[in-house]
Image: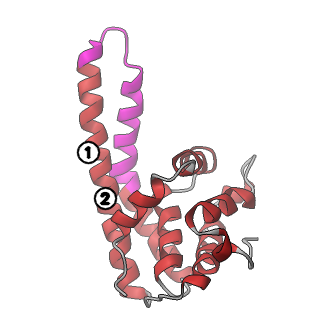
Amino acid sequence: MATPGFWEWSQRIYARDEMERRLLALQDSHGLNVNLVLWCLWSGACFEATDEVVVRKAKDLSRTWSEAVTSPLRGVRRFLKSPPPQAALADAAQIRSSVRELELSAEKVEQDMLQALALAYLRPSADLPEAAIRARRALAAYVRTTDAAHRPGFSIALLEALIELTFPSSESDGDRVG
């Protein structure tokens, strides 16, 4: 079975009820990169165990791209949501829409780079019953590389909710994160 492309896979998962809200909360409140969280879930779904060294490589790659490209675009887009009163609202909205498209393109480039990393370092797996377990382990490895667990309101339950949304209940039992 061929490994599904990360971009297409993540678009399907992101569109699920509650997924966007939960991912953005992890990003905004706990500093986790949405693409890396999705990559951990995708890696669990498509590859054998992702060790912490590969997770760290993915984090470094993502951090570099995000700091230089995606985060500045996101900042501009968010700023334009409430532009200064002197700015014509229609003009600001048009620029915001253009920036949103650029931000989405930057997200896709980041995901393409993460996919290339996975294909270079990980072995594909079609073992679906183990997918949720592998995803949990990849997420745990990612969280260990951050300070997210020390931020107010962080809970392993936030990650478990993502596992539940990504994998059917029958596949997500056992070997919980944490």
Q: Position of residue 172 (x, y in %)?
A: 67, 73
- Is residue 92 shown above or below 76? above
Q: Residue 169 falls in which quadrant of the image? A: bottom right
Q: Does the magenta stretch include residue 154?
A: no
Mark 1 in CB contact with mark 2 (< 8 angstroms) = no
- Image mark count: 2
Residue for point 26% across, 45% down: 102
Give the residue type that dot 2 points to: Lys
Judge from the rendering whether residue 33 lies leftward or rightward of residue 176; answer left or right: left
Give the residue type that dot 1 points to: Leu
Tag shown at residue 102: 1
Q: Quadrant of the C terminus?
A: bottom right
Residue toward you, 15 or 86: 15
Judge from the rendering whether residue 14 lies leftward or rightward of residue 28; answer left or right: left
Residue extending farthest top:
86
Which of the two labelled residues, at mark 1 and mark 2, occupies the earlier sequence position?
Answer: 1
Tag shown at residue 22: none
- Is residue 149 shown above or below 25? below
Q: What is the image's colouring?
A: secondary structure
Residue for point 47% across, 60% down: 13
Residue receiving disc 2: 108
Find numbered disc 2 in the image and state the secondary structure of the residue it sits on. helix
Residue toward you, 116 or 162: 162
Q: Residue 49 falls in which quadrant of the image? A: bottom right
Q: Quadrant of the N terminus?
A: bottom left
Find numbered disc 1 in the image and state the secondary structure of the residue it sits on. helix
Magenta highlight range: 66-90
Q: Where is residue 141 in the image (x, y as percent from the top left)?
A: 62, 74
- Mark 1: few/some/many CA within 10 Å (<14, 14-19, 20+): some
Residue for point 26% across, 43% down: 101
Residue for point 69% across, 56% down: 158
Q: Position of residue 8 (x, y in %)?
A: 34, 64
